[in-house]
Amino acid sequence: MASEPSAIAEQKAEAVEAKPLRADARRNRDRLVEVAVSVFAERGIDGSLEEIARRSGVGIGTLYRHFPTREHLVEVVYRREVEALCAAAGELAQKHPSDVALEQWMQRFVDYIATKRGLATSLRIVLTTNSTLFSDTFGRVSQALRQLVEAAVADGTIRGDVDASDVLHALGGIYSAPDTPEWRDRSRRLVKLLMDGLRFGAVKAR
Amino acid sequence: MASEPSAIAEQKAEAVEAKPLRADARRNRDRLVEVAVSVFAERGIDGSLEEIARRSGVGIGTLYRHFPTREHLVEVVYRREVEALCAAAGELAQKHPSDVALEQWMQRFVDYIATKRGLATSLRIVLTTNSTLFSDTFGRVSQALRQLVEAAVADGTIRGDVDASDVLHALGGIYSAPDTPEWRDRSRRLVKLLMDGLRFGAVKAR
DNA sequence: CACTAAAACGGAGGCGCCTCCGTTTATTAC
DNA sequence: GTAATAAACGGAGGCGCCTCCGTTTTAGTG
């Protein structure tokens, strides 16, 4: 995993309502989150918190001071990943024609959900329990998607009679039931299919 | 808690696909469930399994042999309580005029949900995770209610243009959000209100 | 009854969770 | 630079989870 590109996003996200942490505290906190990403990825959402502390080189007490419950930590990790996904929208928009950017982002969305396979159930529980988390992240993803769709509609690379909600709705099927073996391939095909539909009748032919 | 009226219901429920347990095993299993009911009621759904084993006078290993996970135990307890609630429908139907039976059963339904206050969140999680459990119990409750409603419609103590689904739907509000202090009273009033509505326009005036 | 195989028992042990509090460190004031 | 103090650290300890396996009990058989 990358080591420090997080601090930027983190800073922005936290700035809302947090007095500045002491330098060592901030360092440890960042490292804990970093490590938590790996451990959750390797062992699932039930990965040991003590392992996270150990690998981060801090005591278990430090972990608990920063994240009073497992859910707090999961939430931060989850928010961070959603943030990264959304940030990718901006980057893709700069590097590619807007229809391609949209397509690539959707494929990345598939990858992102794929990571959550297995975690799906537990994650769904966290999301059920914490509805703010759900609505926040849903909002962020919608916004990222809207940006891409509107750009593509504006420059005519996809048809004009759809909006972000339509596309999000179409992607809904991906979010659910990612527990079958063929899920990933099917999802990739779904994205392509969707793009064909979107390009069909676009102002600017390819 | 009562000591042994469970064996009957239990036997019937389990008979579906279980070879007969050895006498001691059956005894311990029953006792574990019995105790689990109390412990979950006292301490919430996160009550200690070791305490349940201890109070039941068996080793923790025995508990785990019968119920490999906490969820297994929760499920059995939950099914049992739903079963008791549904069984009450038959009893009430014999003892009371059918409209009164319906009303009393609905009040009992309120009591039942009340017990689940606090447990609500965790229980909802179990229900989300285990959809069979949800549909099974939903079905059982519907059936009990249907029996009562149909009887009352048949003998004209409530109006004829409603069915069990309508009533269940009306009770839906009780099931959700039982976490406010006034919940219980409000629910009781709701049931009365509903009964007034049901009696209004009945064939047989009271 | 006595014997035996199969079934059930139960608790020790290893691991993770979480709290509590004595120790260490960064920051601020002089 | 040094002292003081607020903040952060970290791990021991108590508790619960769950597994594993030696011991005990039951239900058949002669």
Image: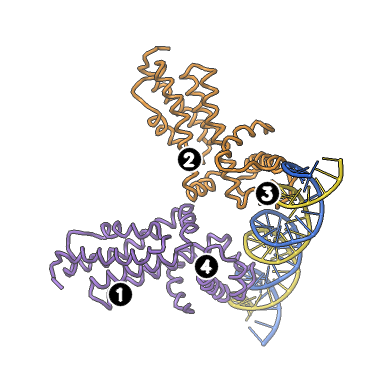
Chain colours: A purple, B orange, C yellow, D blue
Tag of residue B136: 2
Q: CA distance from mark 4 to mark 2?
A: 34 Å
Q: CA distance from mark 3 to mark 1?
A: 55 Å
How far across and how far down the image is residue D12, in percent?
75, 68
Which residue: 49% across, 19% down?
Answer: B100
Q: Quadrant of residue A99?
A: bottom left
Q: CA distance from mark 2 to mark 1?
A: 48 Å
Is residue D30 shown above or below C25? above
Q: Nearer the viewer, residue D16 or B33?
A: B33
Tag 3 and tag 1, C-beta contact below 8 Å = no
Residue highlighted by disc 3: B63
Q: In this rendering, do the residues under marks 4 and 1 share a single chain?
A: yes
Q: CA distance from mark 4 to mark 1?
A: 27 Å
Residue highlighted by disc 4: A40
How far across and how far down the image is residue B127, in percent?
50, 46
Pair 4/3: label in front: 3
Q: Earlier in the sequence, mark 4 or mark 1?
A: 4
The three-letter amino acid code for the residue at tag 4 is Phe
